[in-house]
C-alpha cells in the first residue's frame, strides 16, 4: 500500500508542473484595462499577452543542452522559479516595459520545463498507462488555466496589475515536485537525429492548434466586452473553456483506446466545424464560446495523441528532442496567432472580428487529407519508412 501511495504521489508531482505550462492566457482578462491605462492599441496589448511565447521557444531550444548539463529535475526547478519571479515584477512596478520583462521571464521559465512534463511520463511509464498520463497531463494544463484564471479574476477586481500574482502558485508546485520526483538519467539514443515526415506533421499540427486556440482566447475579451460591456467578468467566462478541456482530456484514454489512429481524423473534423461556426456566427458571444469549447475538445484529443505516438517510436534523448520540437511548434503558433489572424483580416479586407477564423478550416482540411492518405497507406500495409 505504501508503494502504491508513493507511485501516485510521483504521478501527481509530475503532472503538477503541467499546471503552469498553459498559463500565458491567465491574464487575458486585463487586456482591455491594460489598453486603456497604458494607452496601447489592441494589437500591442495582444502582443504583450503572447510575448512570452518568444522566450519559451528559445528556452525550449536550449533545454536539451541545459538538461544534459544539470539534469531534468534542476532544469524543471529553475523554470518553476522563474515563473514565480515573473508574477512579482509587474506588481512591484507597473509599466509597459516591466510587463514586457515579466512576460519574457515567464516564457523562458515555462520553456525550461514545458517539454519535461511529457519527457518524465515517457521516461518512467509505458503502454496504456503512458498514453493515459499524457491525456491527464493535457487535463492538468487546463486545470492550471482554471486556477490561474480564477485567481487572476479575483485579483483584477482589486486592481488589474495584481492579476500577475496568480503566477505565485508556482511556489507550492516547486516544493511538491522537489519532494516526490527524482532526477532521470536516460541513455542517449545512438546515431544522429533526423526529421521524418511524421515529426514534421506533428510539429506543424501542434503549431496550428495552439495558434488557433490562442487567437480565439485573445480575441474573446473584445467579443465579450462588445456584448456585455466593460464590466463583464471575462475570466469567469473563460474558466468554462479549461473546465471542458480538463474533462475531455481525462476522456482521451478511453476514446483513443477505441478509435486508435482515427482519433486525429475525428479531431480534425471537429476543428473544421468549430472554426466554421466561429467564423460565420461568432459575433454572438454564446456561439463564440460553443466554438471555443469544440476547439478545446479537439485539442484534448490531438495533443496527448501526438506525445504518446512520439514516445512509441523514439526513446531517450531522441524522444526529448521530438517532444521539445512539438512544444516549439506550439509556442511559435501561440506567438504568431495575433499576427496571423490580423493579417488574414487585412488580406480579406474584413472588419469582422471573427470571419478570419474560417481560414483555419482550409488548413485543417489540408491536414485531414494528408493524414487520411497516410492512414490509408498504413491500412494497406504500404507505410514507407522515412
Image (cartoon, helix red, strand yellow):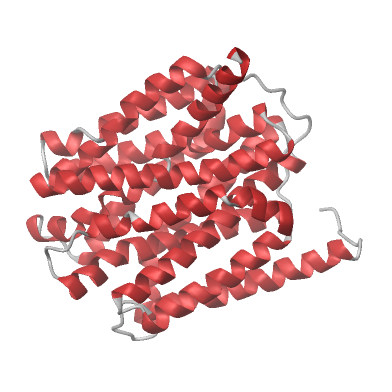
Residue at the farthest top position = 2
Q: How many marks?
A: 0
- Residue 227: x %, y % from top left: 20, 75
Q: Which residue is rendered at x = 66% and y = 27% of the image? A: 124
Q: Residue furthest front?
A: 1
Query: Which of the 4 quarters of the picture holds residue 192?
Result: top right
In this picture, residue 46 sits left or right of residue 256: left
Return the residue nearer the eye: 88 or 193. Answer: 88
Residue depicted at 9% across the width and 45% down the height? 158
Image height check: is 136 above or below 13?
Answer: below
Locate residue 66, reporting x and y percent.
51, 25
The image shows residue 2, relative to residue 190, as above or below, that is above
> Which residue is drawn at the image coordinates 39% and 58% (left, top)?
241
Q: Which of the 4 image quarters holds residue 240? A: bottom left
Return the x and y of residue 105 as percentages of the image width and height: 31, 36
Left or right of 315 on screen, residue 292: left
Q: Which of 17 and 8 is in front in this view?
A: 8
Residue 353 seen by the camera: yes
- Quadrant where the N terminus sits is top right
The answer to whether any part of residue 57 appears in the image is: no
Judged from this view, the residue extending furthest toward the bottom is 349
Q: Position of residue 100 (x, y in %)?
A: 23, 45
Quarter residue 111 falls in: top left
Amino acid at each position: 500500500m505504501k508503494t502504491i501511495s508513493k507511485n501516485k504521489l510521483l504521478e501527481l508531482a509530475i503532472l503538477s508542473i503541467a499546471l503552469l505550462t498553459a498559463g500565458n492566457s491567465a491574464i487575458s482578462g486585463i487586456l482591455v484595462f491594460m489598453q486603456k491605462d497604458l494607452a496601447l492599441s489592441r494589437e500591442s496589448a495582444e502582443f504583450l499577452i503572447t510575448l512570452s511565447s518568444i522566450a519559451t521557444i528559445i528556452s525550449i531550444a536550449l533545454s536539451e543542452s541545459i538538461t544534459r548539463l544539470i539534469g531534468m529535475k534542476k532544469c524543471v526547478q529553475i523554470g518553476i522559479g522563474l515563473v514565480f519571479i515573473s508574477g512579482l515584477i509587474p506588481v512591484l512596478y507597473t509599466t509597459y516595459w516591466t510587463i514586457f520583462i515579466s512576460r519574457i521571464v515567464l516564457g523562458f521559465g515555462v520553456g525550461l520545463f514545458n517539454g519535461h512534463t511529457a519527457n518524465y511520463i515517457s521516461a518512467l511509464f509505458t503502454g496504456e498507462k503512458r498514453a493515459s498520463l499524457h491525456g491527464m497531463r493535457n487535463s492538468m494544463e487546463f486545470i492550471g488555466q482554471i486556477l490561474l484564471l480564477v485567481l487572476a479574476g479575483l485579483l483584477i477586481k482589486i486592481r488589474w496589475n495584481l492579476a500577475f500574482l496568480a503566477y505565485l502558485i508556482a511556489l507550492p508546485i516547486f516544493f511538491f515536485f522537489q519532494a516526490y520526483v527524482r532526477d532521470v538519467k536516460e541513455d542517449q539514443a545512438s546515431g544522429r537525429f533526423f526529421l521524418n515526415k511524421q515529426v514534421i506533421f506533428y510539429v506543424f499540427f501542434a503549431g496550428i492548434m495552439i495558434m488557433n486556440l490562442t487567437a480565439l482566447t485573445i480575441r474573446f475579451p473584445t467579443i465579450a466586452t462588445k456584448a456585455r460591456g466593460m464590466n463583464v467578468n471575462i475570466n469567469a467566462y473563460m474558466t468554462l473553456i479549461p473546465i471542458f478541456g480538463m474533462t475531455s482530456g481525462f476522456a482521451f484514454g478511453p476514446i483513443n483506446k477505441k478509435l486508435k489512429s482515427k482519433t486525429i481524423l475525428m479531431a480534425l473534423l471537429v476543428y473544421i466545424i468549430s472554426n466554421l461556426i466561429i467564423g460565420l456566427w461568432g459575433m454572438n458571444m454564446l456561439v463564440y464560446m460553443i466554438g471555443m469549447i469544440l476547439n478545446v475538445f479537439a485539442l484534448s484529443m490531438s495533443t496527448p495523441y501526438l506525445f504518446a505516438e512520439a514516445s512509441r517510436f523514439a526513446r531517450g534523448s531522441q524522444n526529448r528532442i521530438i517532444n521539445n520540437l512539438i512544444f516549439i511548434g506550439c509556442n511559435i503558433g501561440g506567438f504568431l496567432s495575433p499576427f496571423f489572424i490580423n493579417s488574414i483580416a487585412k488580406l480579406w479586407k474584413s472588419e469582422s472580428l471573427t470571419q478570419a477564423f474560417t481560414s483555419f478550416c482550409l488548413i485543417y482540411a489540408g491536414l485531414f487529407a494528408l493524414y487520411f492518405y497516410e492512414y490509408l497507406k498504413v491500412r494497406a500495409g504500404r507505410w514507407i519508412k522515412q
